[in-house]
Amino acid sequence: MFKYTIMIDGMQCGMCEAHVNDTIRKNFPVKKVSSSHRKKQTVIVVEKPIEKQELQNVINNTGYTVMSISQEPYEKKGLFHL
């Protein structure tokens, strides 16, 4: 699995976060997505890598501005995960 951290400019409130999350869910097969307008970031967890340029285009088309995208391997952490 992969984790993408996207720095986004323009989110001002919880509705902005929901708008970004809904747009990402509609365009990509994500396992998890969460946004924070305070941190100016969205975090996505997916099973297969996605094209960074396509991700940037989808978010930019909503009216927000992608400032950066970073990708890293993701390992599920939890009490029973060994």
Image (cartoon, rainbow, N blue to C red):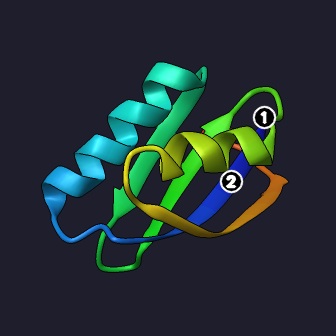
Query: Do we see residue 28 in this rendering?
Result: yes
Q: Relative to residue 22, is residue 12 drawn left or right? A: left
> Residue at horizontal 16%, vertical 66%?
13
> Residue at horizontal 68%, vertical 53%?
4
Which residue in the structure is indicated by mark 2?
4
- What kind of residue is marked 1? Ile
Mark whose residue sits in front, 2 or 1: 1
The location of residue 18, given as percent across then percent down, is: 25, 44
Q: Relative to residue 6, is residue 2 drawn left or right? A: right
The location of residue 69, given as percent across then percent down, is: 70, 63
The location of residue 41, given as percent across then percent down, is: 47, 68
- Whether pointer 2 and pointer 1 mark residues with C-beta atoms closer than 8 Å, the reply is yes
Say few, some or many: other residues with alpha carbon within 10 Å of mark 1 (under 14 / 14 to 19 / 20 or more): some
Secondary structure of the residue carrying numbered label 2: strand
Secondary structure of the residue carrying numbered label 1: loop
Q: In this rendering, is residue 69 above or below 58?
A: below
Which residue in the structure is indicated by mark 1?
50
Residue 2 circle label: none
